[in-house]
Image: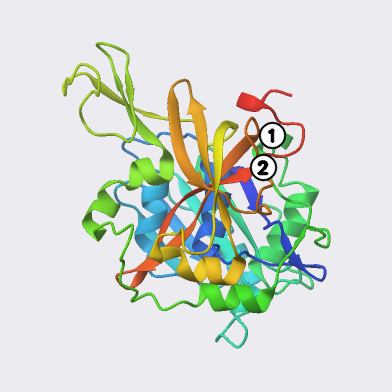
């Protein structure tokens, strides 16, 4: 039997009217990815099988993308509808049956799902929720027993999560559970849809990375996985299976660098004509974008595109977090990587307040 041990929600910062709207570099996978990362944290599962239930419309790559995101080479992925009764049924079934960890992920992009078969939009707009369930001696049935007026899984989860989840501690309910009307950065929905709907058969002329190399490097690209040498204590990022200082292969330990509260040490603006061709549509739709050099750990600096911020908003010395976002379409699919976003007000380097 299992019980819910942690829950997290993610609401985009953009809005159109009072409804949350995802940015052009977001989709259901990136929404769900942020919720999952907040739920999973740095949990390390070595031998236990993992099952992931996806509620809603997700891109095909989500079947392998979510297992990679949580550091699992393989996991059982089950796709389900995104309505409220389905969420209730899945949670209750997982709590009453089976062993090992399970993730339940629900995501919605109402502005992009208009007319989609079986779509049940949430009144809150774009959002994602994730639940982590683990084996326990006794099932603790969640308080998802009645859907009331909620038709979508995300809407139900947001309402119930805000009230508390069957006695979970406050520090086990993470993220953006305040489903109040949006009042954040204004988003031009038509522009977002044009950019998000780009032809994925684009041919690279600039920052081309073969798909095999892209997939090989995903642990570093997505999770900031690095190698720490037990002999000389050097940290190598991206992970190369060899120490960059002593060149040893036999003394490496995989570690994850911090993904939040990095310090900006340099910024530059990329204007029209200065971008790799992969970002042509982004510049045409949204104008210039910033790129920041971010120190995520002592001596480890990563170059990241800035998102969820006005051009020029991020400055040297600022604290930034990172989120998984879409980069550009290539070889018939979207490529994903981490981008920098401004840290919440009051957060300083390494998360101190």
* Residue in the foreground of this view, choosing between 23 and 53: 23
> Can residue 2 be seen by looking at this rendering?
no
Quarter of the image for residue 246 reads top left
Q: SS at mark 2?
A: strand
Residue at 33% x, 36% y is 238
Residue at 44% x, 36% y is 302
Residue 170: percent from left, percent from top = 73, 36
Q: Is residue 107 left or right of 51 when viewed as pictured?
A: right
* Residue in the foreground of this view, choosing between 270 and 150: 270
Q: Quadrant of the C terminus?
A: top right
The residue carrying pointer 1 sits among few (fewer than 14), some (14 to 19) or many (20 or more) residues within 10 Å by Cα, namely few
Residue at 62% x, 33% y is 316
> Can residue 202 be seen by looking at this rendering?
yes
User: Circle 1 is placed at which residue position?
Assistant: 171
Residue at 71% x, 54% y is 143
Disc number for residue 174: 2
Disc number for residue 152: none
Q: Are marks 2 and 1 in contact (CB under 8 Å)?
A: yes
Residue 281: percent from left, percent from top = 49, 71
Q: Is residue 18 left or right of 130 when viewed as pictured?
A: right
Question: Going by the picture, which residue comes out furthest to the top?
Answer: 231
* Residue in the foreground of this view, choosing between 196 and 75: 196
Residue 216: percent from left, percent from top = 25, 48
């Amino acid at each position: 039997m299992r019980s819910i041990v942690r829950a997290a929600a993610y609401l985009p910062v953009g809005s159109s009217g009072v409804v949350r709207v995802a940015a052009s570099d977001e989709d259901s996978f990136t929404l769900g990815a942020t919720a999952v990362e907040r739920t999973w944290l740095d949990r390390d599962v070595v031998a236990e099988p993992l099952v992931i239930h996806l509620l809603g419309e997700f891109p095909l790559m989500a079947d392998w993308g979510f297992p990679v995101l949580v550091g699992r080479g393989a996991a059982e992925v089950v796709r389900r509808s995104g309505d409220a009764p389905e969420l209730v049924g899945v949670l209750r079934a997982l709590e009453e049956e089976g062993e090992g960890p399970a993730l339940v992920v629900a995501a919605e992009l109402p502005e992009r799902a208009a007319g989609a078969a079986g779509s049940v939009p949430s009144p809150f707009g774009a959002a994602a929720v994730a639940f982590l369930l683990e084996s326990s001696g006794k099932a603790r049935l969640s308080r998802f027993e009645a859907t009331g007026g909620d038709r979508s899984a995300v809407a139900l989860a947001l309402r119930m999560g805000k009230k508390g989840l069957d006695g979970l501690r406050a520090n086990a309910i993470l993220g953006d559970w305040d489903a109040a009307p949006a009042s954040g950065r204004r988003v031009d929905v038509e522009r977002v849809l044009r950019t998000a709907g780009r032809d994925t058969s684009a041919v690279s002329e600039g920052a081309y990375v073969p798909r095999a190399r892209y997939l090989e490097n995903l642990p570093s690209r997505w999770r900031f996985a690095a190698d720490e040498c037990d002999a000389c204590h050097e940290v190598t990022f991206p992970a190369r299976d060899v120490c960059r200082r002593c060149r040893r292969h036999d003394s490496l330990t995989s570690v994850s660098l911090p993904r939040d509260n990095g310090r900006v040490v340099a910024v530059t603006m990329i204007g029209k004509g200065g971008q790799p061709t992969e970002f042509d549509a982004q510049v045409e739709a949204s104008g210039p974008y910033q790129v920041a050099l971010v120190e995520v750990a002592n001596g480890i600096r990563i170059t990241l595109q800035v998102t969820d911020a006005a051009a020029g908003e991020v400055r040297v010395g600022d604290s930034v977090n990172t989120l998984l976002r879409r980069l550009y379409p290539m070889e018939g699919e979207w490529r994903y990587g981490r981008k920098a976003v401004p840290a919440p007000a009051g957060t300083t380097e390494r998360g101190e307040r």
